[in-house]
Image (spheres, grey):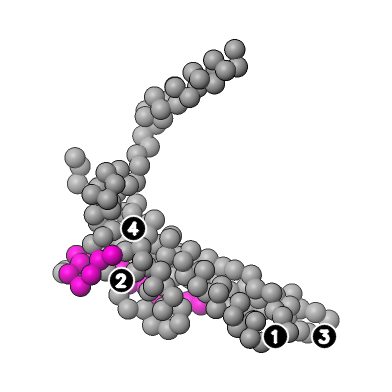
Amino acid sequence: MRRLRFVLAVLAAPVMLSGCGLRPVYAGGGSGPVATALADVAVAPIPGKAGYFMQGALATRLTGGAGAKTRVEVELDDQITGFGIRTDQAVTRERRTLRARYRLVDATAGTVLLDATASSDAGIDVVSSEYALIAAEETALERLSGDIADQIVARLALYAQRTAPPK
């Protein structure tokens, strides 16, 4: 009896979900409207070390070149805050926070199509080796850049889906 209920539930799930209004963002695969729109987004230069990592992370996710119809412009705020202070006032833990304000801009008209923010943070253990601490801070920055790039691309995909012409 349990097995029958399970089979019926599995068979009924697609029918029930089809009526809830959920639609896959990447419908149509690589030639769908969202994938096509994301392939036509260029990444504007982003200054600084954090900008270098963010530029690379976005460039691997967005493939628009010089002739792209839109571009994403990103402003970063990178902060490291010490906490976890010992009795001798030495910091034992740091939090690295990376915030991004990004805009999707129409390349020809210069109008802003989307203006949003994304952020992420990471904890870093402060150790006695300065080299190890610098390496940990840089690794955290690289990971945070990837996290924020994922957030930006997800928001751009949602925007592309909502503004895509109806079929």
Going from N to C along the chain, the mark reached first, 4 or 2, is 2
Residue 144 screen position, x and y as percent: 51, 69
Marker disc for residue 43:
2
Classify the position of the N terminus by image quarter.
top right
Q: Which residue is mark 1?
A: 129
Going by the numbered disc 2, the residue's amino acid type is Val
Residue 65 screen position, x and y as percent: 23, 70
Residue 85 sits in quarter: bottom right
Q: Residues within 10 Å of mark 2 (few under 14, many from 20)?
A: many
Q: Which residue is mark 4?
A: 156
Residue 152 screen position, x and y as percent: 39, 62
- Tell me: 11 left or right of 88: left
Q: CA distance from mark 3 to mark 1?
A: 18 Å
Q: Residues within 10 Å of mark 1 (few under 14, many from 20)?
A: few
What residue range appears in magenta? 63-79
Going by the numbered disc 3, the residue's amino acid type is Asp
Q: CA distance from mark 4 to mark 2?
A: 12 Å
Q: Which residue is mark 3?
A: 88
Going from N to C along the chain, the mark reached first, 1 or 4, is 1
Residue 17 screen position, x and y as percent: 41, 30
- Tell me: 43 left or right of 67: right
Q: Secondary structure at mark 3?
A: loop
Going by the numbered disc 4, the residue's amino acid type is Leu
Out of 82 and 124, give the one closest to the viewer.
124
Nearer the observer: mark 4 or 2; the answer is 2
